[in-house]
Image (cartoon, rainbow, N blue to C red):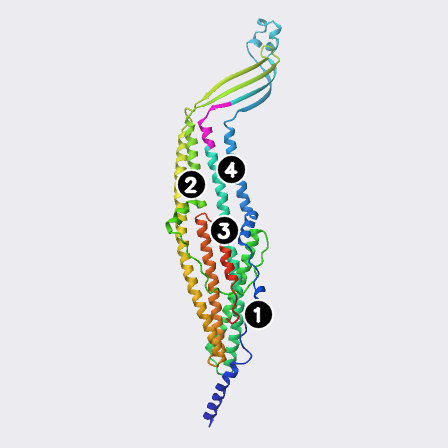
Amino acid sequence: MARLSRWILAGYLVGLVPDVLAQPLAIEAPVAVPSDERIAPLPSLAGLVALALANDSGLRSQRFDSQATAQELELARAGLRPRLDASASYRYQDADNIYTNNPADYPDEVYDDRVSGETHENSWELRLTQPLFSLERWRRIDMAEAQADAATLQVAVAERDLAITVVETYLDAYQASRTLGLLNAQRESLVLQQRQASRAYDLGIGDRLNLLESQSRLDQAIADQTASENDLANALSDLERLTGAPLAMLPALVGTPEALSIAAEPRPLETWLAATRDNVSVRLAAEQEQVAQRDTEVRRAGHYPEVDLVVGYSDLDSDDELRTSQDFTASVEVTLPIYQGGYTSASIRQGELAALAGAASLDNEWRLAQQEVRKRLRSMQGDLRQLEALQRSIESGALFLQAATRGQSLGLRDLVDVLDARSSLYDLRIRFVETVCVYLRDRTHLAAAVGELDTPSLGAIGDVLERVEQTPIDETS
């Protein structure tokens, strides 16, 4: 009789299952906000990069250094222009010479000051020097021009690196905000799922494993939500530091385009590799090699003579009337270094080795740029395949969720199945957003590798994100 009672009770509880699962836990859309108020417009990526270029103090320092280096050209040109020097002096002399030792031999008043041995003199001089021939100074102009170009390219490299940093930080903020929005909605489903599993377990018709699994998934969603909140806060803080302006990017629930068609790059690999010559790092290395070569030429010019035209005028006022004079001189001076202890030869060898180092650095930068192109193209191709697969998976997941919802309404599925299908669909959407951001990062680095990271390329990144943002959210999924 007791066994029969237990079977009757079990049958009664089984009969309650449809009623229990159909109680007030009906699924509703996580977000019921009108579509026109759902998501705020995204900040302009090109505008943020422009703000960063104007605000970054490190970049400002690079620009001032470039301007300072550009003055080397004027310094080099000044070496070929006339030089005018003025000098003045006062001189006191107490002499012991033939006049002071033999005063009787010089009784004339003209020699009184010389006989006394003391002389006070005031003098001033103007000296004009015009280089007529100096190979070293001419070559310094060429080297200064190369240095100025290299300094300009250093600023360009700093600007490119800063733009990449802004883009990556912007994508980090976007990914964190959209992931957080999806996690918030997923958490609602997981809370309902855990509550339903707990209720079924309390009634004795549920499995403890299902209860533990639902609790584990809920705890994981909470942990992921906390991590996304931290990532979003850090990314927005970095963007404010870079741009100097506060930026708001609130969590938002985004839909997934049914067909986010992104065309593959039409250019062949050889064209991309040839375009790496426009990479600013490669151009900088090439210009630095030119600087080293020009510097070597300047050092070699140290073997050649220098010819100067010197014109001078001097005025000497002395107690000794025989020394008082006004002189005008004109001369051509030739200077030829003959021996300097091996300094010139060592300096030339040093310059040649620096030029070899510059050539090796250029080859290295070019190889790095080409490898970056290959890596980013491969990554982009993989990203596009992942996006296509995820879109198909999301479409299948949405159909499964609709089927589970309909099955629940017909009593063929329970609420746990519906909630599990919804949670899985959120996971797929989160992966989709992450893959889109990975693709855009690869696209940014590819553009930078070939010197095409400009306003149109930044606009293209924003266009892809806008297409994701403008996808309507299906409130049934």
Q: Which residue appears at 52% of the width and 82% of the height? A: 20
Residue 374 spot, x, y in % from top left = 39, 52
Image mark for residue 53: none
Which mark is nearer the camera, 1 or 2?
A: 1
Q: Residue at x 50, y 41 (%)?
A: 152
In the image, residue 33 lies in the stretch drawn in magenta: no
The answer to whether mark 4 and mark 2 are in CB contact below 8 A is no
Instruction: Report the Cα–Cα distance between label 1 and label 3.
Output: 36 Å
Spatial CA distance of label 3 from label 2 is 27 Å
Which label sits in the foreground, 1 or 4? 1
Residue wearing tag 4:
69
Report the residue marked by disc 3.
456
Which tag, 3 or 2, sits closer to the chain's start?
Answer: 2
| Above or below for 415 versus 144 | below
- Residue underneath mark 1: 32
Indicate the secondary structure of the residue bearing disc 3. helix
Q: Relative to residue 342, is residue 106 drawn left or right?
A: right
- Residue 49, how many percent across, how many down? 53, 51
- Bin the neighbour count of mark 4 within 10 Å (Cα to Cα): few under 14, some 14-19, many 20 and up: some
| Residue designated by label 2 | 286
Type of amino acid under label 2: Ala
Q: Residues within 10 Å of mark 2 (few under 14, many from 20)?
A: many
Q: Closest to the observer: 386 or 173?
A: 386
Labels 3 and 2 touching (C-beta < 8 A): no
Q: Is residue 44 visible?
A: yes
Q: Tell me residue 423's x, y (percent).
A: 49, 71
Where in the figure is residue 470, as x and y percent of width and height? 52, 62
